[in-house]
Amino acid sequence: MTRIFSGIQPTHHLHLGNYLGAIRNWVGLQHQYESIFCIVDLHALTVPQDPAALLRATREVAATYIACGIDPVKNIIFHQSGVQEHAMLAWLLGTITPLGWLNRMTQFKEKAGKARDNAGLGLYSYPVLMAADILLYKATHVPVGEDQKQHIELARDIAGAFARQFGKEVFPLPEPQIFGAATRVMSLRDGQKKMSKSDESDYSRINLTDDAETIALKVRKAKTDPEPMPETVEAMAERYEVANLVGIYGALSDMTREQVVARYAGQQLSGFKKDLTDLCVEKIAPISAELNRLMAAPGDIDAILKKGADRASAIAKPVLAETYDAMGL
Ligand code: ADP
Ligand code: NA
């Protein structure tokens, strides 16, 4: 059996990286497999959140999933805090996770920065909660962007440790599914940093809520070098910013990098940027329009989340019971 699980944190608006690295791929998978798409609000709490903003963002992520084409009837869409078993399983798995494994996690190092001692315990144990999210549903496949690969590997290690320690294979080993060319969309301000909700500069990312004018401004302001468009893919190896824009263009138009480079070889960057703007607007405008329409009826979104949480609980409860049983609880 194949079961898909994936999630996104409800912090700020979702951006092009979330779309190309994750949601767009889910849209294709939802018809093939039983799929569970979570809004991981407990994860969002690992950095300070304003409660009203968190609630709003949770609804907005749900609306974004639906606006991008995820069917909430065919699939389960729910918020993590709506299923209490996530936190319980995270505790149980935390008891068998060596600190050494967590110390290797690059996301913690990036997010905690230099002031390690001030970072919260939740930020440190984030990957254990993420393992619990996946294993609670016995998910076999986790479609994510490349940045999450290390976390999925940890989830596999934890599932393996559980099986060794308790002699029961409660959890299948989940496989990361990383699709396509734009699995790592980079910041528009720094071609060597990933596009992220947590970047302080709003110009670093194109949000799925942006209107045409905002998109045009962000693409125009996107940092690049002064050279014309490269003649070959090899020639842009060290031109990170241009390579990123080419990757985005290719992902949005279903073209390879080679095809994009061939189309614009030697041309001025401004013309390419103009076409990229049009392409982004064409793909994002319908999403943001639908998202705004859905956000006007928050009660309907809450009802979808409630129904999703009930369906998710029905899967999670027996798995947690099985885990308790294996551990002698
Ligand atoms: P963020 O890093 O912006 O806070 P999340 O951690 O909530 O976003 O990630 C949600 C999903 O989006 C994950 O599957 C992640 O791999 C994917 N993702 C996030 N940023 C990018 C990016 N820049 N490029 C590709 N995929 C991304
Ligand atoms: Na991430």
Image (cartoon, helix red, strand yellow):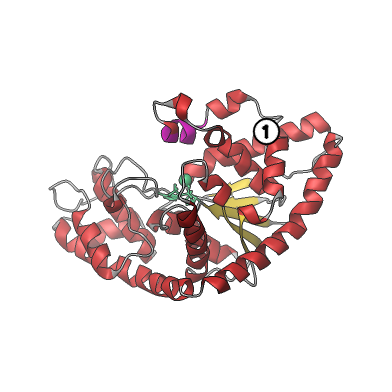
- Report the residue at 48% width, 61% height from top: 56
- Report the predominant secondary structure element of the magenta stretch: helix
- Report the residue at 64% width, 47% height from top: 133
Give percent across and percent down for residue 320: 78, 47
Give percent across and percent down for residue 195: 36, 48
Q: Is residue 173 visible?
A: no
Residues packed near mark 1 inside 10 Å, few (<14), some (14 to 19) or many (20 plus):
some
Q: Which residue is mark 1?
A: 94
Q: Which residues are magenta?
A: 105-111
Q: Nearer the viewer, residue 210 or 184?
A: 210
Give percent across and percent down for residue 104: 52, 27
Give percent across and percent down for residue 92: 73, 36
Tell me if residue 107 is in the magenta stretch.
Answer: yes
Locate residue 47 relative to residue 77 in the image: left or right.
left
Q: Nearer the viewer, residue 288 or 275?
A: 288
Amino acid tagged 1? Gly
Tell me: residue 94, above or below residue 84.
above
- Report the residue at 69% width, 56% height from top: 2
- Report the residue at 71% width, 30% height from top: 95
> Which of the image's four quarters has the C terminus?
top right
Tell me if residue 309 is in the magenta stretch.
Answer: no
Locate residue 203 relative to residue 284 in the image: left or right.
left
Residue 163 found in image quarter: top right
Residue 115 found in image quarter: top left
